[in-house]
Image (cartoon, rainbow, N blue to C red):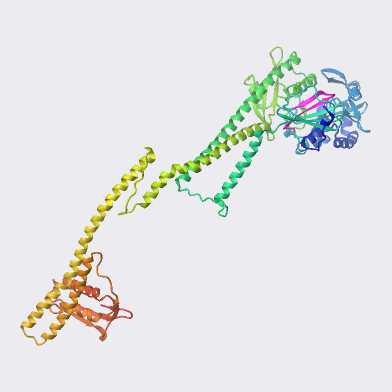
Amino acid sequence: MKNNEVVIFGLSQGEHIAEKLAEERDPVAEYMFNALQQEILTDTFIQKNANNYWLKQEEINSYLFDKYFNGYWEKYQISFVLCAKGDLLLADGQETDCWNYFERRLRLEGSRISSSNLFQLNNYAGRIDYIADIPILGDTIARKLIVELSTVYLNENEGYPELLLDEKTKTSSLSLDDYSFAVYNKKKLVYKTGNYNFSTRLKISELAQRSYYQYPSENHQHLVYQKDNDVTILLSRKKYSFYDFLTSLAYILVITSVCFLIAAVTLQSFPFYVKLSFHDFSTKIQLFLIGSILVSLVFLAWGTTFYIKKQYQEKNETTLQEKLRSVNFELESKVGSEEFLADELTDYVTAYLVKFSNVFYTDINLYTTGGKLYATSRPELFEKGIKSKRMNPQALFALNNESKAQWVQEESIGELSYLSAYIPFKNFDNEVIGYLNLPYFAKQGALEKEISNFLVSTLNIYVGIFALALLISVLLINQLSKPLLLIREQISKLKLGSDIELIEWNSKDEIGALVQEYNRIAIELNESAEALAKSEREVAWREMAKQVAHEIKNPLTPMKLSIQHLQRSASMNSDDLKERIERTTTTLVEQIETLSNIATAFSSFAKLPGKELEHVSLIPIVKNAVDLYSHSLMVSLEIHENLTKAIVLGDKDQLLRVFNNVIKNAVQATEEVEGPIILVSLVAKENSYLI
């Protein structure tokens, strides 16, 4: 690479991660250790039990963990050994002198940190590893407390659940879920993690120390950080594709559309306010279409999530079973010749479990046939009391009492659930000497990410479907409902006696049948309206004829009687003949005028005589009506309190007709009565007259 291709970047997120990965010092841990070792040197519990360390190893190690190496130190994988000269230690599958083994490691691999007993190991480029050599004064023999600290990357070992670390440690740890990185020492690969397939040799030219170089590949973006002349960090991350951009755009579009829709429906002051009418057919179709898509999306998401979880669990079970068989085969080749799991073999078996754990990326536990923990690759889980040292009773019952060849079940540590597989561990004689257990801490984040990726993909598809559905609902649903709206409009115009408009519809579908039925009913209704109008006219004529006959008949009878009475008076030469002629003549003239008005109204057919309101006196009108009957019947008039006039606002002809009808009704009601007396009285009230 040319010199002008070296680019010094600002500290972006990737560059910050690269620097943290290349950093092989932990100043906080070094500072804390200086104070910590002073307390360990004066700890009386360790001094009193130092000579019995190999008998109380578990107790002393637990004491050191709980009192000194908790909290911040949980970011490291820690191991303890308290040994003197001559003590034997199983290292690399062989027994060796403990004292000499660590002195040789410190001499070859370690660099002392200032004046303390803490050494930094340089055996693993790109990692932070320490080893401490603390002298312990026992009762008789000098001993050394060896503390090994190795950096823990949470994604390095799938068997180590991240929930076992405290929140502070997890927060301070690097988040490498989206990255793959590799550490090169002199351009040779010494360590890598992640999904990217790194090359075993770094194929770039020399870079200046503390410099960065960024370059793309087909699907990834790479960042090279040259820490010094030897160590190079290569950080890789998958490129953001156009599909990822569409995914983000889909989220924004959905959220914006939902907010816009809520505002348009609920806020009347909104510029695009939409008033939903749930009685409209088109609105119902739109809501049904959108609701169907939403319900389908929910059920599809639920069903797919369930399926992915099921497939993920089945895949984990298959992976776990394969690892369990492989570990069982390897461990059987090492200790299969034993008749039982002896106590003196615990360290030997533990060393192999740790080795197999690093190979198969899973924790390994070995229990005795009685269900007691014999050896484990992750002792800190049991030493801290996070897991019980007794085998799960359900698994023990299934393997021991029911003779199951294999048992997989779900177990939990606090809120963390995980799969745990058990298998009988047999020796070469096919005798069960223990039970092998592999817990599989499948990462919940990986499952959630897989589900999220599917839902995002589904969301992208459904955003397009939603847009298409809205377009259909706006453009096509109105076309579908147009004939129904036309029928509704035509029905609203239907009125009896008015002209009808038939609808033309050529299609022979359901709408066509509805239009045809409307046209038939409209024609029948028009015919019925004409027949009804004709019938009403005939009825009106009959009623009018009855009314006119009734109005004419009322005054004719008394008029006839008055004339006959006048004839008798003339033949008898009565003294008051002249007066009677004038009174009878006046009465007959008024009645004849009333009959003339009725005839005039009948000739126009439309109505009876209209009202002509004027101020008239009731007394002469009542007297006129009474005089028609007073000659032959006992009909008399009484006017109280000497009324001379009783002025009202009314129609003179209609009042006369009313009094004629009332008096005639009285006469007809007394036809069967002997010597009837009909009295008409006029009484003045406060604001009215009572007749």
Left or right for 643, reference 570: right
Q: Position of residue 269 (x, y in %)?
A: 57, 55
Q: Is residue 593 magenta?
A: no
Give whichever of 18, 316 is nearer the camera.
18
Q: Identify which residue is drawn at 55% across, 54% down.
A: 268
Give the quarter of the figure containing the N terminus.
top right
- Examine the rendering and report whether any part of residue 678 can be seen: no
- Which quadrant of the view contains residue 298? top right
Q: Magenta part of the protein: which range?
A: 176-193
Q: Position of residue 344 (x, y in %)?
A: 80, 19
Q: Position of residue 392 (x, y in %)?
A: 68, 27
Q: Identify which residue is drawn at 33% across, 45% down.
A: 519
* Predominant SS along the magenta part: strand
Q: Residue at the far left: name it.
A: 571
Q: Position of residue 412 (x, y in %)?
A: 68, 32
Q: Is residue 297 above or below residue 600?
A: above
- Which quadrant of the view contains residue 205? top right
Give whichever of 684, 240 is nearer the camera.
240
Q: Residue at the far bottom: name it.
A: 575
